[in-house]
Amino acid sequence: MLGPGRTLEAAQLRAVYTRLPHVDARELPHIVEADRDYVAAEMTAFLLGWLAELPCRTVNRPTPTCLAGPYWRPERWAHAAAALGMLVRPVEREEPGGAPRPWGAGTVAVAVVGEHWYGPVDAATGRQAVSLARFAGADILQTLFERGPDGTLRFAGADLWPDLSVPAVNAALLGRLLDP
């Protein structure tokens, strides 16, 4: 951990895992309010370029839409899952253009780190989660499956931020970051 006033050169970095999708204007209260959106966009663009050029291992390389990897809309995740042969829960929105319907109580989270999956599902479902992460180009991904009326698991969604409080997921990520 660096102390105040210490500088770390990019060449000294061994690995990077970004959990920030973009710089949000609300995080810049010290900037004149009228300029916050512009400054946030410029900071995001700078970080995107900087992260993309880092010579070290970068988990979930940045994309033009997100500093932390493929930041897809629910429909795109569902389309990709279906293209890979998964059963998919339809994406339903509470209102046109609104938020997707929340996941049900029977939703199961499956984290993917590299080629491994972590979650209370059978091996076939775990392999599906890994294949979706590979398809998206994500080194780490949280996939969600919802139990259908017949008991089968259907893909319900994905995001780039798995629950790192799960010890096995945290250890796998740390291993991925530090493994030479």
Image (tube, helix red, strand yellow):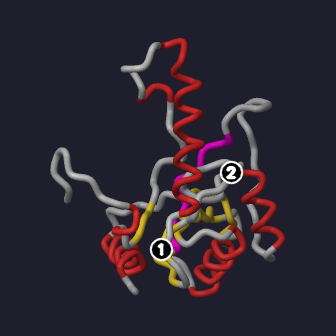
Give the extent of the magenta segment. 100-112
Residue identifier under label 1: 57
Q: Is residue 34 above or below residue 86?
A: above
N-term-proximal mark, 1 vs 2: 1
Quadrant where the C terminus sits is bottom left
In the image, 67 versus 3, the foreground residue is 3
> Which residue is drawn at the image coordinates 74% and 38% (left, top)?
93
Q: Identify the element where label 2 is drawn.
A: loop
> Which residue is drawn at the image coordinates 59% and 52% (left, top)?
49
Residue 52, percent across and down?
Answer: 58, 60
Image quadrant of residue 78? bottom right
Residue identifier under label 2: 64
Residue 162, percent across and down?
Answer: 46, 62
Q: Is residue 93 above or below residue 76?
A: above
**Residue 35 is at least partly visible in this image:** yes
> Which of the numbered marks, if any, corresponds to residue 107?
none
- Which amino acid does the dot numbered 1 rest on? Arg
